[in-house]
Image (cartoon, grey):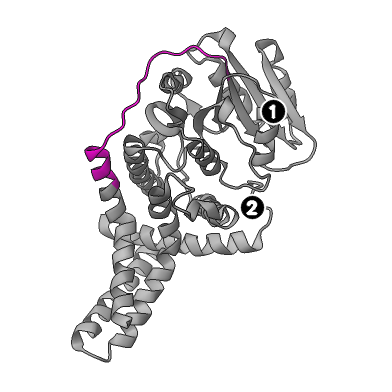
Amino acid sequence: MLATLFFVSVFLIAFTYAGYPALIALLARLRPRGVSRSALDANTTIIMVAYNEEVRIADKIRNCLAQRYPRNLLHLLVVSDGSDDGTNAIVEGFAADGVRLLAFAERRGKAACLNDAVDASSDEILVFCDVRQTLVDNAVANLLENFADENVGAVSGELAFRSEEISDFGEGVDAYWRYEKFIRQKEAEFDSVVGVSGALYAMRRELWQPIPDSTILDDVLIPMHVVAQGRRVVFDQRAIAWDRPSAAAADEERRKVRTLAGNFQLFTHHPGLLVPWRNPLFLQTVCHKLLRLLVPLLMLAALLSNALLARESIGWRMLLLVQLAVYGLAIVATFSTRVRHNRLLRLLAAFFQLNGFVVLGLIEFLSNRDAHRWR
């Protein structure tokens, strides 16, 4: 039983990060589902939720208004989530351009704001984006082309990083995102992506379903609602939102821990996602989301079972030494600046850091009931 536990744990770890990307790529190649794209002119509302964004909000509004899309069909709604700086006044300054402000005195979190924003919108297509990123000028038009296909209910844009602004640490963030983007693209080619990029995505207004105010990962729960209604969620790499990756490990840790806390919340509050006949994307959800939350437990199981088996043969003792050596190299790679140029060690350190974030994400989910209020 210990040997079975060891080999199953190692297999699932390898499958999570290498096997599943290979499997979904194979499925996408064997049974691809294309999207019938064509130019689409539809009444569209861009929705942004902002909290104390006086430094960036004006530039983002101008960026949205500069979209190459019929101006009479494009509307912009900014939701101020209890901002107490100059955000509201700046947004009101764009009223002549047709920009609407929905301001709330108290901070409630993004999910509650999205529910109210959609209630205040009646356009056929809703585009959601964050304040931080810069959209290419044809991003909205490219997103809407996907809705010419009646099977498409939502579409994710692409979050991309400007190479000239990437620091040494940011290179790791960029590499991880390219890996994640590959998986999402193949999921979309096969059927649908499990989640979209919160930086830029769009959906049909008719498919909207309110989400709990405490929701952390609105950009996963909302598209899952779309899929549950029989529509596809696709990925369009032409609709780009340019961003700047975290330059410091502490910033990336905060972002990643919150996201992982959201994944724990997702499965706890919506257990139907783990029921095959209730979730059309059961395979993708389990392999892309759930297994990643289990990897730290699988790592512990592999180490402990190997330690107990080490007394039985030299082969098990050698495997244990290999495991301990890998852990030791990961610790060195994490805390030593001398190995930052060794790609293999950087990847090893990133793997262990990511799974450390999973543990912190679980703690965040269990201890912080205000995790949905992003700081």
List the single residue furthest toward the right.
Answer: 105
Q: Residue 3 versus residue 110: which sits nearer the camera? A: 3
Tell me what residue is drawn at x 35 percent, y 67 percent: 330
- Image coordinates for residue 65, horizontal then vertical, percent: 56, 16
Q: Check disc 1: other Cα within 10 Å, few if <14, some if 14-19, many if 20+.
A: few
Residue 257 shows in the view: no
Question: Who comes first in sequence, dot 1 or dot 2?
Answer: 1
- The question of residue 43 being in magenta is answered with yes
Left or right, 122 with reference to 164 = right
Mark on residue 119?
Answer: 1
Residue kind at label 1, given as amino acid type: Asp
- The question of residue 344 being in magenta is answered with no
Residue kind at label 2, given as amino acid type: Ala
Q: Which residues are magenta?
A: 24-44
Tell me what residue is drawn at x 70 percent, y 29 percent: 87
**Which residue is disc 2 drawn over?**
371
List the single residue furthest toward the front.
Answer: 277
Left or right, 211 with reference to 347 = right
Q: Secondary structure at mark 1?
A: helix
Identify whether 340 is placed above or below 34: below
Dominant secondary structure of the residues highlighted in magenta in the image: loop
Left or right, 3 with reference to 222 = left
- Image coordinates for residue 292, horizontal then vertical, percent: 42, 58
**Image quadrant assignment for residue 166:** top left
The N terminus lies in quadrant: bottom left
Label 1 close to label 2 by CB (< 8 Å)? no
Residue 213 shows in the view: yes
Q: Residue 149 versus residue 51: which sits nearer the camera? A: 149
- Image coordinates for residue 233, horizontal then vertical, percent: 44, 34
